[in-house]
Amino acid sequence: MKEDILEILEKNSRLNTGDIAIMLNSSKEKIEKEIEEMEKKQIICGYNTLINWDKTNKDLVTALIEVKVTPQRGEGFDKIAERIYRFNEVKAVYLMSGGFDLTVIIEGRTMKEVALFVAQKLAPLESVLSTGTHFVLKKYKEHGIPFEGPRKDERMVVSP
Amino acid sequence: MKKEMIATKVRELPPSGIRKFFDVANEMKDVISLGVGEPDFDTPWHIREEGIYSLEKGKTIYTSNSGLMELRCEISTYLSRRFNITYNPNTQILVTVGASEAIDLALRALLNPGDEVLIPEPSYVSYKPCAIMAGGNPVVITTKAENEFRLTPEQLEEHITDKTKVLILPYPNNPTGGIMEKSDLEKIAEVLRKRDILVISDEIYAELTYDKEHVSIAMLPGMYENTLVINGFSKAYAMTGWRMGYAAGPKDLIAEMTKIHQYAIMCAPTISQYAGIEALKNGDNDVAQMKASFNRRRKIMVNGFRNMGMDCFEPLGAFYVFPSIQKTGLTAEEFCTKLLYEQKVAVVPGTAFGESGEGFIRCSYAYSIENIKEALKRIELFMQQYQ
């Protein structure tokens, strides 16, 4: 049941609980209780809106930073990851396998702002050995949704 | 050219009821539709990719008449894995241009003038005209809402004569969404076993049944020899435009059907056949996801109609809901025309699927939830004048 709810919400978090209840042969109250429970347990961590900022007037650049760090005794990578993700500019942090340790996704208003953040905040951190900054030029798809805009329903109005 | 030059048989063939309605609906602007008979998904990308790849490799030539051997092997594996029926890919499977071609071929291969074809209705629009074109006499069996539009053994028995040669078994059913469960099929099989009647089992919606698994009549004892299974890729894999279907059955029948297919069509489109191989090999997950999505929308729609007080049995197959509009006092066609003009919602009159569809409308839930809810809202407004 929980997983069914999550699957539905992941695709469209604006569906009302009444509709979800119908879809899952349940009651509105039960669904609401389940959702509340999952919110408390932090299974549901928030409800974001997927925005294509390129279509607005707002300036926004995204960068992906490859970070190499020295893991700390007893803390592994967690402590340094936390020191990084606490910055507001940081949108996501992942621990990676392979050539570097952390992927840090940063958003800023201009390339300069992002570059300065890396130079002044990220790189000087004691455990950070090196950083490599890659700017995102265009977003094609995010969270499973292509950014090309809604497709028109080209099916005939009526067909057998 | 004089109109009289057209063959009488063709001239007398009524145009598809749905077509008349389509012409009206299509002219109007801002129509919100529940009228289509195809999925709202794109064909899964890995399947399209395989079609593209086949083009890149230059697979732009004919295949054998029966279809690519690899595809027929995959079809054979699929039918045995999903429905527990075994067919020899060499002699018992024919790849066709959509399931519709398979229906046409089967009837042409089987019917002599005067042979009777039993057709449960409401059902898909092409059985009757194909039977007529093949020189047979269609005999309609009217299925009933109170039986959830299933075919009953009593009804079947009543309509069998010395001339009966074929029974068309259109389940899961378009337009009603009705299905036949194993127990229902067993009763039908019992009537048929005593007789030489061939069953054309149109199972194009077999992957789309909800809460109950689809059962093919071909897997019941004694039925395999007298059943032709028709299936395809359109509904299960959202591949309507690829025109890919197939027939599987007794080898003598498949051989004769292949003869007609060979003269009329040559072979199904080659690109589509390569895409079909990929669909059968790696498409199970897509089918499961699309089915889950249809099921959710099905519940929203059934619930919506019931909440506005319309009689609506629970359809367990395909992607249609078939509510009754009898209490409005309107005919199905009047209802649909008025609904279209007053609320700009396009649904299909039940009568497009046979006279027995009178008093019902077909509503497809192969649309987004938002679309479905908006349409339901408008239908509810429309229904208020009949409270």
Image (spheres, coloured by chain):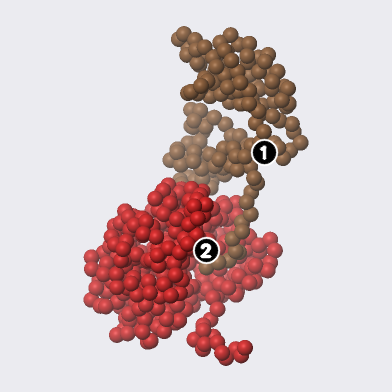
The 10 Å Cα crowd at callout 2, few under 14, some 14 to 19, many 20 or more, is: many
Q: Which residue is drawn at 52% across and 74% down?
A: B351
Q: Residues within 10 Å of mark 1 (few under 14, many from 20)?
A: some
Q: Relative to A22, is B125 above or below? A: below
Taking the image as shown, residue A10 lies to the left or right of residue B66, namely right
Q: In which quarter of the image is residue A56?
A: top right
Task: Say which quarter of the image contains residue B335.
Answer: bottom right
Distance CA(mark 2)–CA(mark 1): 33 Å
At 56% across and 51% down in the image, what residue appears?
Answer: B369
Residue type pointed to by label 1: Asn
Q: Are marks 2 and 1 in contact (CB under 8 Å)?
A: no
**Chain letter behind tag 2:** B
- Element at badge 2? loop
Task: Determine the colour of chain B.
Answer: red
Q: How many marks?
A: 2
Of residues B90 and A150, the one nearer the viewer is B90
The residue that appears at 51% across and 28% down in the rendered structure is: A42
Q: In this view, does B135 lie above or below A99?
A: below
Where is residue B211 drawn, in percent x and y? 38, 53
The location of residue B102, given as percent across then percent down, is: 41, 70
Is B167 or B185 nearer to us in this picture? B167
The vertical placement of B366 against A160, above or below, is above
Q: Which residue position is annotated with label 1?
A: A52
Specify the amino acid type for callout 2. Gly
Residue holding disc 2: B37
Q: Where is residue B245 in the image (x, y as percent from the top left)?
A: 43, 64
Can residue B172 be spotted in the picture? Answer: no
Q: Which of B9 and A87 is in front in this view?
A: B9
